[in-house]
């Protein structure tokens, strides 16, 4: 079996990989290039980092590479992985292993092996269970190892586990989520046995830490084929285990978008969004408040204030998945604001534009993108109307930007000047006055300090 052209330079005589293999051979060990490095090379995809496997134990790996490497990362040493930095390249070297989760623990028990085939058999999918033996000498050729038919599955675009899927998913339940991550990033399809196993074993995801689930889900959300991946999560029931708000949308009718349910609309919106994590997460959660706000009246079904409820639900779910505060703030704010543009159907006054920009803050560009992507109706006339409305909004923003500091809406004086003018100490009155001055700025545009003091005088008269 020929070596992928993309890897020829990496494995060529005189390469770092050969030098590394020689170091291991001197200690009586073998070295293999494995995993995503091999898969992506066969697919013609870029894969900057290199993953190696060896029969050497972690402490031996550390001893072998310590003088050769520029730096070492040993956080994964307990699980058999030693991270190496060499010439700016990241290299991970892992002892042949098998992972088995205890029923009551989120931490895997690790059993090391001396056999590359056994190691490959305990990997997640056959397309990641191929290896290339790296020769220690420059006169030998690298050898391809594919004991589980990964090359054929790669050609067919199939995701299949090397062993029975219940064994693979039992070793690490996160692999059930990883199955759909590869659907999203590679465009491959899961085989029937893997899908059936996910349906049976989905509750095992509960023993995986929120952080690991989040990191895997992030990769899924920015994939090119995110729609089929999300449908897979819902249809197998796996979504119920970590984002139950999303499958709950399937029961909600949404006549505005003319989908059979809000879930279909939601996934369509995610697919339309560019692959930016915060934006796609906002698209996924933007309507999660609809089940709780559904009401029926003479005009049919309504979801009034679903964005308010949805923002709270979004924040709670992202916190449970241990997302960074910055991501939680961005996504929940986008969910909260995603209906704002639709409240100005009669046109954009200067004050309305200022208020919209002030409320959107640093999320303005993403908010406008989300609003555009939220249009999935088959009614082309309505879609064009909404698109024109956002065009008009962005034009008005540009016009006002040319006249004033639109992103820094503030009164011409600050709280210290207010206190000095009135001779008062810090307190609620200062905050009330500053809000009044800001409101005047939003309604009427920039104004001089003299006008601010006149407004304060007027405010003081109403309090006397």
Image (spheres, helix red, strand yellow):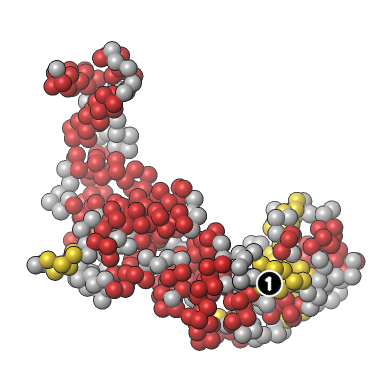
Q: Is residue 237 visible?
A: yes
Q: Which residue is drawn at 34% across and 43% down?
A: 361
Q: Which residue is drawn at 64% across and 84% down?
A: 163
**420 sits to left or right of 381:** right
**279 sits to left or right of 135:** left
Mark 1 burial class by Cα count in 10 Å: few <14, some 14-19, many 20+: some
Where is residue 84 shown, x and y percent of the image? 74, 57
Identity of the residue furthest to the front in this view = 104
Where is residue 424 shown, x and y percent of the image? 29, 15
Q: Which of 346 and 398 is in front in this view?
A: 346
Identify the secondary structure beneath mark 1. strand
Figure quadrant of the C terminus: top left
Q: Which of 420 and 25 is in front in this view?
A: 420
Identity of the residue furthest to the left in this view = 298
Q: Residue at x 66, y 62 (%)?
A: 49
**234 sits to left or right of 69:** left
Figure quadrant of the N terminus: bottom right
**Residue located beneath label 1 in the image:** 99
Q: Which of 205 and 149 is in front in this view?
A: 205
Q: Which of 436 and 188 is in front in this view?
A: 436
Locate residue 57: give its quadrant: bottom right
Q: Residue at x 42, y 58 (%)?
A: 317
Locate residue 387: give its quadrant: bottom left
User: Does 322 appear above or below 242?
Assistant: above
């Amino acid at each position: 079996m020929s070596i992928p052209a993309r890897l020829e330079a990496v494995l060529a005589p005189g390469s770092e990989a050969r030098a590394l293999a020689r170091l291991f051979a001197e200690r009586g060990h073998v070295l293999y290039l494995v995993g995503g490095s091999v898969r992506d090379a066969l697919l013609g995809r870029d894969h900057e980092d290199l993953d190696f496997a060896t029969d050497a134990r972690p402490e031996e790996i550390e001893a072998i590479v310590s003088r050769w490497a520029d730096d070492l990362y040993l956080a994964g040493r307990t699980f058999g992985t030693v991270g190496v930095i060499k010439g700016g390249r990241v290299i991970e070297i892992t002892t042949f292993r098998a992972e088995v989760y205890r029923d009551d623990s989120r931490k895997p028990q690790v059993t090391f092996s001396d056999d590359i085939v056994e190691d490959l058999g305990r990997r997640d999918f056959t397309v990641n269970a191929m290896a290339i033996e790296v020769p220690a000498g420059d006169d030998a050729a690298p050898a391809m190892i594919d004991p589980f038919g990964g090359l054929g599955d790669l050609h067919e675009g199939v995701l299949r586990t090397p062993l029975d899927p219940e064994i693979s998913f039992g070793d690490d339940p996160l692999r059930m989520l990883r199955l759909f991550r590869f659907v999203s990033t590679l465009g491959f399809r899961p085989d029937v046995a893997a899908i059936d196993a996910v349906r049976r074993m989905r509750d095992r995801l509960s023993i995986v830490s929120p952080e690991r689930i989040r990191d895997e889900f992030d990769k899924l959300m920015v994939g090119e084929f995110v729609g089929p991946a999300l449908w897979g999560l819902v249809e197998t029931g796996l979504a119920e285990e970590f984002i139950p708000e999303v499958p709950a949308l399937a029961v909600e009718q949404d006549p505005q978008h003319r989908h059979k349910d809000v879930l279909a609309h939601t996934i369509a919106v995610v697919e339309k969004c560019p692959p930016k994590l915060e934006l796609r997460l906002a698209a996924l959660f933007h309507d999660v408040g609809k089940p709780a706000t559904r009401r029926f009246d003479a005009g049919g079904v309504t979801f009034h204030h679903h964005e308010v409820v949805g923002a709270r639900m979004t924040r709670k779910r992202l916190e449970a998945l241990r997302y960074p505060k910055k991501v939680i703030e961005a996504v929940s704010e986008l969910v909260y604001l995603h209906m704002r543009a639709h409240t100005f159907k009669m046109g954009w006054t200067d004050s309305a534009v200022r208020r919209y920009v002030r409320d959107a803050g640093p999320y303005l560009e993403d908010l406008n993108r989300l609003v555009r992507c939220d249009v999935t109706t088959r009614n082309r006339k309505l879609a064009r109307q909404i698109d024109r409305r956002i065009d008009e909004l962005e034009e008005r923003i540009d016009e006002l930007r040319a006249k004033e500091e639109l992103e820094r809406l503030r009164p011409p004086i600050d709280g210290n000047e207010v206190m000095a003018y009135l001779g008062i100490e810090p307190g609620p009155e200062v905050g009330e006055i500053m809000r009044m001055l800001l409101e005047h700025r939003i309604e009427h545009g920039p104004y001089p300090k003299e006008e601010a003091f006149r407004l304060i005088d007027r405010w003081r008269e109403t309090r006397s």
